[in-house]
Image (cartoon, helix red, strand yellow):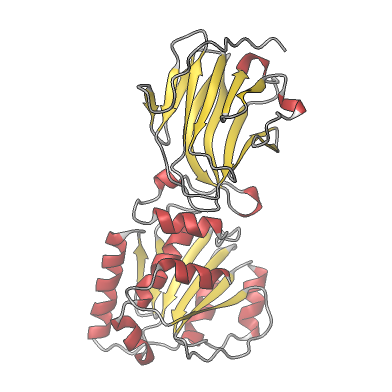
Amino acid sequence: MDLVYDHNDTLNPIGDIMAKIATGSKQLLSDHLITLSWSGLGSNDDLEIHLDGESTSLSSLQIDEKLQSFMRRINIQKDDFQISLKKVPSSVKVINFVLNTTSHGPFAWSVVGHTTDDEFQSDAITVGLNLSCYLLRLTRSGDKWEIENINIPVLAGGVAGVPMYLVTEEVRPAAQYAAFRNLAAGKKNFTALIDLTASMAPWLQVNAHMICMEAVSAVAATVTRKHVPVSLNGLKAVEVEPGLAGQAFLQSEIKALVSHNLVSKPLHSLIPDMVSALDNESVIYVISDEVPAILPKTIAQLEAKNISLNLIVLGADSVIPRLQNSDSIKVSATGDVDRDTPVEKILDAMAS
């Protein structure tokens, strides 16, 4: 292999003055021979390269044989790689670098050209603990290549989720955790039903329902940027955006309904209508302190439409009745929850 590199050259380490590429931004490279350097990788973090539908670990000291035609490690003590973009097989249009993390970071990368003034570095980003995440993408653009700074979690089955830089900032840590736990489970649509019957009054007072809705919003944010439809016990339907503004809006709507002492319908009468109205591959999250009866007819419809019903049950002393066995129904017992409960506790209950 005739890659050229002068080991006497001094590379700019990440942190020196280089053009920064913000997360979600692209830059056209003018050079075909580059050095890619990584910062922040721990000894247990696994960096992979994805191309032609295959993933190959770069964490070993030796480059895989199929990569050697265009890539090599230039310093066995650092995560530096020299890449000859002209030698990348013509069938390869996109190269992704994916990090399987064992720490939060921050992580960053830099790209330096060997025959031009190309010098770029990424913003340092923090990603979810134990999360697989796309961090850098190289894409063919005519006879040149573009580099793109990305932060996209890898969900169940290798599916790419919503880029984390597009997720509302205050929701991002919980969304990263939800992505790590693969809580979206291949679903596309998310909706919630909040119980407002009399027994829920103590939980409403301590904002337990709001912590649960934070968890629901976090799961939805890994897959879609849409607002989450929420039924307030069948009395009113609202659309809730992720983040503090959405939480404040939802809380005000619930307070208004409760203050009018409206008669709430029992959950078991609301769920069948919700299932009938939803699209396939949806998830319904029911936030309550009880487990409603689910009729066989409703279970059959859940299974036929690939809809998941996740019953988020509040209270350490909640009675969990025996339900008809179905992979479409899940009971997530949260234990006691109040305004100080971390949202991760609810996400853990949803994953267990």
Q: Is residue 249 above or below residue 326?
A: above
Camera-side residue: 313 or 191? 313
Q: Which residue reaches farthest right? A: 65
Residue 125 appears in which quarter of the rendering?
A: top left
- The location of residue 170, given as percent across then percent down, is 34, 55
> Is residue 59 at least partly visible in the picture?
yes
- The location of residue 316, given as percent across then percent down, is 47, 87
Total numbered labels placed on residues in the image: 0
Q: Is residue 41 found left or right of 206 in the rendered image?
A: right
Q: Is residue 280 above or below residue 18?
A: below
- The location of residue 20, given as percent across then percent down, is 37, 27
- The location of residue 315, given as percent across then percent down, is 44, 86
Q: Is residue 241 above or below residue 269?
A: above
Which residue is at a point 36% across and 51% down the rendered structure image?
A: 168
Quarter of the image containing the N terminus? top right
Which residue is at a point 69% across and 82% down the rendered structure image?
A: 325
Q: Which residue reaches farthest top? A: 115
Quarter of the image containing the C terminus? bottom right
Camera-side residue: 333 or 127? 127
Residue 180 appears in which quarter of the rendering?
A: bottom right
> Is residue 230 at least partly visible in the picture?
no
Which residue is at a point 27% across and 66% down the rendered structure image?
A: 249
Which residue is at a point 27% across and 84% down the rendered structure image?
A: 258
